[in-house]
Each structure stands twice: as C-alpha cells, then as structure tokens.
Image (cartoon, rainbow, N blue to C red):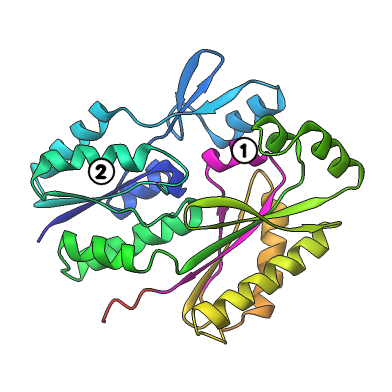
C-alpha cells in the first residue's frame, strides 16, 4: 500500500528535509503587522526572532482548509492513502479541522491525533515514514502512533518571562517579581498542555531539574533504565550554542542512547516563550516489529 506522509512545520522538519525524506510539510501561517507569513517559506528562523526583538506583534494561525485539501487531493492521485500528522490537538485547532476535513475522504486520509509538537512530533513523522516503508497500512500507522502518544516528554527552561506575560499565561506582577528574583521557570509538554513544572534560579539548576525529570520518565514510564530504547533530543529557541553544549553533557549521562538530535523548537512554541530557551525531549522508540 503506497501511503503519503504529511505533517506541518510545527514538527521542525524543513521543506528541504521533507523533500529529501519524501515527507510533505505544510507551512504554518503567522500574522505579523497585518501580513501573513509562512514558516520556512516566507518566514525564516532569523526573520522571526528579529521581528520578535523589534517588538512586532506575532500571532499564530492554522493552514487554510483549501490548501490542506488541495495537497491531499494531489497526493491521492499517486497514493492509496494519506497519513496527516498535525501538532497536538490541545495546542491548536488545526488537528480538529483536519479530522473534520478527512471525513470527506472515505478512509483514504487518516489524521493522527497523538498530541505531540516540535521535536516529539518530528519523531512521530519519522516513525510513520518507517512504518509505511515496512508495509503497514495507513490505519495501522495511525493506530500505532495514537496508542503510543504519551510515550514522550518535553522539558523547557525559559530565559525570560516576558512572552508568558504577553500571552496572558502569567500576570505582569508575577513576571516582574520572577525577573527580579532571576527565576528560570521549567515548563513541560506531555500530551495536550504546556504546563509549569518547576522553578530554578540558574540555568545550571534548571538543566539539572530537566535531566532528573527525563531520567524518571525513562525509568518509570518507559521501563528503559539505561536509555537504550529511548530517543533523546535537545531543542532551543535561538540558542544553538547552549544547545550544542547541553548535547555534550547529555552524551555523557546517557551513553547508550543513539545520536542526540539538536534542533530549534517550532515557531508556534517560540511565540509563547521567546528566545534563549533550552529544552530536552525524550521519546520511547517505537518497536516497528511488534
């Protein structure tokens, strides 16, 4: 069965990477100063952070239903089915929109609601591609990804509270106090929500907290004490140097994991947390033979 794999740019997969891997990436739209820009098409990472630094109001949107359906229609001319993997339904309405649109396609389009975003969403897309190569049907791929949706975590430490304040996630007074006390909040994404996890006073302390949380997930949730069957990644918002240093630290702590991937957090997340953040993700490897 020939299955096409579709995702959106929230996965962090670039247009170039998608073409090389045979994955179709829908660019996410961003509204800035009355104009619409598309991630990795008319909006680069550098452009985004420059506009953020300039104080431009940035809001996220979802892809046009017409654009989504046009892509599916083109793919179904050469494929028997489409797997569509959008960002978490708890963080955007784009997943629900895609599920409604898919009802018109008579079991030829399968939308995966496995509640992931950014680096963990990227891993789901790569797993889907491998399952398609192995001959699994679109329905089987969707079911496997949704069955394992909670086998992933993201922990993020922020450099600034300014953008949480702008988004209304904390009060101006709390942001001012946090900045005065030099608090570095640690957030977590597990499933549908971006939640508070812990508070640190330094980046070093925040990294220690995140590493401890990942160790706990690997041992207690994934039952993989040595991390041999867990994918670990480092993500960041305009903070690549620190991310590469963090990778070196993690390679010593988790020597039995595979190559640690380093990449930027999706711009949809960056809108809410700003530049300078550092994150670690862990995802249980999918057993493609089971």
The residue at the point 29 percent across, 54 percent down is 112
Image point (68%, 79%), residue name: 253
Task: Tell me, yes or no, if residue 257 can be seen here.
Answer: no
Above or below residue 13? Residue 145 is below
Badge 2 element: helix
Circle 2 packing at 10 Å, graded few (<14), some (14-19), many (20+), is some
Q: Position of residue 270 (x, y in %)?
A: 60, 40
Q: Residue 62's x, y, as percent?
A: 39, 32
Indicate left or right for 29 with 143 as reference.
Answer: right
Q: Which residues are magenta?
A: 259-285
Q: Which residue is mark 2?
A: 99
Q: Earlier in the sequence, mark 2 or mark 1?
A: 2
Q: What distance separates the C-alpha of mark 2 from that of mark 1?
A: 25 Å
- The reply to whether the magenta stretch includes residue 283 is yes
- Looking at the rendered image, the quarter that the C terminus falls into is bottom left
Nearest to the observer: residue 173 or residue 97: 173
Residue carrying label 1: 272
Query: What element does badge 1 sit on?
Result: helix
Q: Mark 2 or mark 1, which is nearer to you?
A: 2
Magenta span has 146? no
């Amino acid at each position: 069965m020939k299955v096409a794999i579709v995702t959106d740019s929230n996965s962090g997969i670039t247009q170039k990477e998608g073409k090389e891997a045979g994955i179709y990436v829908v660019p996410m739209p961003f509204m800035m100063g009355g104009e619409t820009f598309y991630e990795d098409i008319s909006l680069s990472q550098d452009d985004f952070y420059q506009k953020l630094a300039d104080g431009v109001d940035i809001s996220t949107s979802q892809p046009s239903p017409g654009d989504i359906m046009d892509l599916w229609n083109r793919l179904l001319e050469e494929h028997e089915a489409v797997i569509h993997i959008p960002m978490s339904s708890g963080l955007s309405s784009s997943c629900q929109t895609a599920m409604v649109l898919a009802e018109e396609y008579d079991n030829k389009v399968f939308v995966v609601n496995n509640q992931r975003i950014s680096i963990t969403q990227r891993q789901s897309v790569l797993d889907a591609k491998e399952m398609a190569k192995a001959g699994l049907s679109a329905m089987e791929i969707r079911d496997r990804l949704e069955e394992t949706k909670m086998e992933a975590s993201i922990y993020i430490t922020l450099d600034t509270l300014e953008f949480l304040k702008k988004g209304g996630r904390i009060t101006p007074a709390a942001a001012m106090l946090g900045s005065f006390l030099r608090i570095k909040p640690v957030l977590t994404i597990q499933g549908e929500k971006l939640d508070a996890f812990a508070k640190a006073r330094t980046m070093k302390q925040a990294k220690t907290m995140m590493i401890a949380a990942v160790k706990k997930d690997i041992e207690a949730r994934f039952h993989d004490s040595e991390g041999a069957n867990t994918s670990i990644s480092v993500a960041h918002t305009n903070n690549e140097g620190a991310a590469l240093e963090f990778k070196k630290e993690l390679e010593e702590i988790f020597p039995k994991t595979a190559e640690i991937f380093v990449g930027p957090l999706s711009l949809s997340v960056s809108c809410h947390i700003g530049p300078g953040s550092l994150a670690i993700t862990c995802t249980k490897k999918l057993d493609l033979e089971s």
